Image (tube, grey):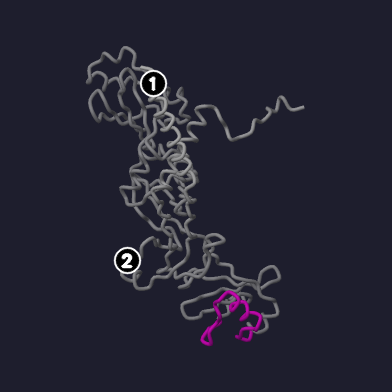
Amino acid sequence: MKSFLKGLSIFLFIAIIIGFCFCVYILQAPPVAKPDPPKLQVHTRTALRDRPTVNSKPIVYTKDVYRFSIDQKFISNLNTGLLSNELLFSVPLGQRTLYSAELLDKELKTVFNWQKMFADSEAEIRLSSRAPTTKVLISGKDWFLTDSNGAGFTVQKNGNALDIYLPNLQEAFENNKNTLSADVELSIEKIGKQWLIKDNQSLQVYEIRNGKKKLDVFQQSKYPIHTFLFNADLAAITALTEGDFSKDLRDGFVLHRIPLSRNAKLTTREDGVSWRITDGSQKYNIQNEEGWLKVFLDLESRWLLLGVNDSIKGWIQRERGTIFLPPEPILSSRQQLKVKLSAFLDGLKERVGISKQPYQVPNAELP
């Protein structure tokens, strides 16, 4: 017996040493390379054939574009800011647990005070009608609840209680071939009428409008289009009134990599203090404001100036422009194990109570 325990101890000791060395080897895996920053591209041939290149997405819409419509039941998601079918609250059934399926269906339709249940819950959501409609999905098991605005909730029997869930707005987007990432912001523009969903990962904004019987989803201009280009000295007015461009004005266009061609046409507006330049497919507007001549880009131009962030900016075609999203770096098996091991160790530290944050003295204990 002693020899067996001794052998087992030696085996465990060797196993621990090997495991420790293996963990050290895994944790010393090369760091994961950061993906290259996105960049602007113009794909003429593929865009003409409606075949965008791999990892490329359309750049910009100069106005909101209608994408699809969804049921009004998703108003409940938009009013709460929760996009998935999360559990809001539960209601104990009590004696109603013993009711037959048909009688329980009738109770939910006629007797249940849903208005009070929502008001008493911690879900911080209220029904807009004192007499909501309850539709039977599966008798005695599943129901669908809607208020007067069309906001919907799924009701499911769970043992001796009823669970009230939100619909799944993320799934509705996926069914219409528009996937929302986990990093989204939802804001209410007009209560019950207009909402905005900003996807920070895809840099896309969706506007949702409450129609007569449906919610209409529009895709907003994806990136900020810079219409203001530069300021020119008021001395350029003399040349403009004579139908010509001053050197200062031409230099401003050259500086922005859009030099005016010899065929650029100048038109004076009726007010006499603003002008329009048409240079092929490019159009510009000049206005006399605040002691300067301000030059603006017309949104009807073929080329638009985009400034997504410090690393993504430049001129892009309005109809054929795309943004190239470099693929995520491919992890080696060793790097994958490092990610999993690091996550395991972090979870273990939380369970043990080891925190990376230094202890902070509460405000009440400050001298």
Residue at the spot of label 1: 5
Circles 2 and 1: CB atoms closer than 8 Å: no
SS state under label 2: loop
Which one is in front, 53 or 356? 356
Which one is in front, 195 or 250? 250
Which one is in front, 12 or 229? 12
Classify 10 Å Cα crowding around label 2: few (below 14), some (14-19), many (20 and above).
few
SS state under label 1: helix
228 above or below 151? below
Which one is in front, 91 or 358? 358
Residue 188 bears which disc, if any?
Answer: none
Q: Quadrant of the N terminus?
A: top left
254 above or below 312? below
Q: Amino acid at mark 2?
A: Arg
Residue 51 bears which disc, if any?
Answer: 2
Residue located 49% across and 44% down the image:
187
349 above or below 230? above
Classify 10 Å Cα crowding around label 1: few (below 14), some (14-19), many (20 and above).
few
- Residue 247 is one of the magenta-drawn residues: yes
Horizontal arrangement in the rendering, residue 94 relative to residue 207 (left or right): left
Residue located 46% across and 44% down the image:
25
Percent of width and height locating residue 193: 44, 44
Q: Which residues are magenta?
A: 241-266
Write down the quadrant of residue 52 in the picture.
Answer: bottom left
